[in-house]
Each structure stands twice: as structure tokens, then as C-alpha cells.
Image (cartoon, helix red, strand yellow):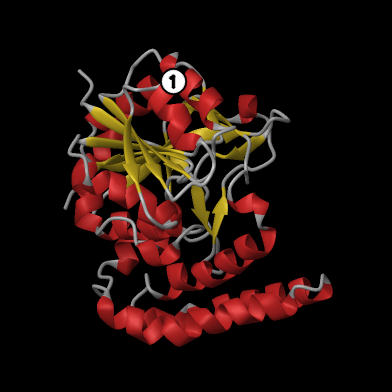
Amino acid sequence: MYENSVLIIPNHNGEELLPDCLTALSKQTLQPERIVVVDNASHDDSLTFLRRSWPEIDILESSKNHGFAGAVQRGIDATNEPLIVLLNNDARPDPQWLESLSSCFINREIGSASSLLYTPAGVIESIGIGLSFAGVGYRLLEGIHPDQVPERLLEVFGASGGAMMLRREALERAGGFDEIYFAQDEDIDVAFRLRYAGYISVSVPSARVLHLGGKTLGRNPTRSLALAQRNLEWAFWLNIPLWAWFLWGPFHIIYQSASLLRHATRGKGSLVWAAKLEAIKTMLRLRRERKHPVGFVSAILPWIGRKFRVYDPSTESRHMP
């Protein structure tokens, strides 16, 4: 028996994207209890289209753009279904998508589940989030063909935000999505905090979603790069204990210094450096406002540099809080 789910779609000027997204959802073999579109102050005809063509969908309107993180958290706060599904408006899920994701949540230790996102070219964009040796989140199995992925439930470090399912109880224990991220790396931040809360993340290869990619932030690539470079610093430094700043931090700094040089050769050095400075200026304040991470050695350390492992539910009791 599947638990009830609410599907939340953040939207900003997505009138051209919503029809195909919603049509794909209407063909799901398992339907969510409700669908909520959280509109980030769109100035196109998104809302007119929704009210005319999809009156059964709930709409949450914002007077300003809260980004992905703020929008989905508003949707989460306004609902109470035990399972939360997040989907980008430029995503087109296959018919079995929601049923495949829902099926794994019979295991109580699972806090989030990631889809297999594939591109219009037919290759994988991501099956979930990995954590590199430098402490940077990255897309798992990017660029390979979907048929090369094992047809089994896989445990990964975290779930990709563009098409994911979350257990509400787990997300509440972890503290929810942090609006400071706006967009980019908010899912990595949540991945850290879910693991600290005692939950795991899985990838469901049978839950496939075509992702057009970059249809909102991609309209402003400069802004997208700045957010990514700022937010990856927050995701790293705010989610590791202070002692790890001194042991793991140097590897992160070396990696990011090399990244800065690469961006400088492409004429983006000043933009990236400004993003890093913004992160540094706010770091101590944000650190004080956050609950200090506890359990790094057991929850995070085993996943540094690891891609995935086949999920074994028999070990469930190890992870529950």
C-alpha cells in the first residue's frame, strides 16, 4: 500500500514548459494525492494557463521569486502528505516514475529517493548526488547510457532535487530546505542533513525522467554560475564539524583554487571570486544559526569518494534515528 504523496512544482515564467510536464504527470500509473504549483512571481501567463486548463491543481502564489529552495519549502509547509515529491517544470517523467519512487518508501530508513534523469540526447544527467574527495557534490553516472545502470535499488549520498521524493518526517528532522540557497546545491545541503538525521538516500533506476535542463536559471548563465560557486561553499563548510574544517578543508581549498584558475582562463575569474567572497562573508553568521553537525564519522565519512552501493534493507536498523 502506497502512502499518500503531494507533488510540488516550482515555477517561474514556465508557461511554455508546464503543458508537457503536467501532461506527463496525467499519464502516471500512480497519481499523487494532490499537485501544487508554487509560482515564483511569474510575469508570463503561467497562472492563467493553470487556472484555465488544470483547475484541479492547487496554486501557491508568491509576490517575489524565492528560487527553487524557497518555493518548494513553501509548498511543503502548506501541505501535510507523508511523502513529498519535487519536480522541475522542465521535467517529463515516464509513466511508471511515481509508482517506482513510491515503492521503496516501505523501508522506514529511506529519507529521500532520486530518479534517473536523462537528457534529450538519451544519456544520463544524474542518478543522484555523489560526494567527491574534495567535498563537492556531483552528478552520479553523468553521460552514460541508462541501460548501463544496474536495475536495482542503489544507495547514494543524496537525491537530485529536479525529480525526487522525500519522507516528510525525515525532512522535518533534517530541518527542511534552506531558502538562503535560492537555487543550486540546496539538494546537496539537504543530503548532508538527512544523513546526520539518521536517514539514507537511494536511487531508483526504474524511475526515469526526461530533463530538458536549465530552462529557468539557464536563461541567466552568469547568475547560475555565481549561485553554484557560492552555494557549494555553504554546502561544504556548514555541514561538517569544526575539526573537519582543519583536516578536510585544505583538500577542498586546493580543489577550489584550481577551479578558480580554470574559470579565470575562461574570463569568469572575477565572477567566481566574488561568489566565493560572498560565501566567506556570511559563513560565520550562518554557522552560528545552524545546528552543529554531529555524527560525521558514521554518516558522512563512508560516502566521501563513493559513488553508490546496492541497497540492502536488511541493514535498516543501523540507520534509524
Left of 148 or right of it: where is 234?
A: left
Residue in front for this viewpoint, 267 or 116: 267
Q: Secondary structure at mark 1?
A: helix
Residue at horizontal 59 percent and vertical 32 percent from the top:
16
The quadrant holding residue 2 is top left
Q: From what the image shows, is residue 257 above or below residue 21?
A: below
Left of 59 or right of it: where is 154?
A: right
Q: Amino acid at mark 1?
A: Ser
Q: Is residue 150 visible?
A: no
Residue at horizontal 34 percent and vertical 22 percent from the top:
55
Count of numbered marks = 1
Q: Residues within 10 Å of mark 1 (few under 14, many from 20)?
A: few
**Residue ID for mark 1:** 53
Residue in front for this viewpoint, 198 or 225: 225
Q: Is residue 28 visible?
A: yes
Left of 23 or right of it: where is 269?
A: right
Residue in front for this viewpoint, 308 or 166: 166
Q: From what the image shows, is residue 127 above or below residue 3?
A: below
The image position of residue 80, as x and y in percent, is: 17, 39
The image position of residue 98, as x and y in percent, is: 38, 24
Q: From what the image shows, is residue 173 above or below residue 295?
A: above
Residue in front for this viewpoint, 289 or 206: 289
The image position of residue 40, as x and y in percent, is: 43, 50
Residue at horizontal 65 percent and vertical 51 percent from the top:
218
The image position of residue 303, as x and y in percent, is: 44, 57
Image quadrant holding the N terminus, namely: top left
The quadrant holding residue 283 is bottom left
Q: From what the image shows, is residue 306 above or below residue 33?
A: below
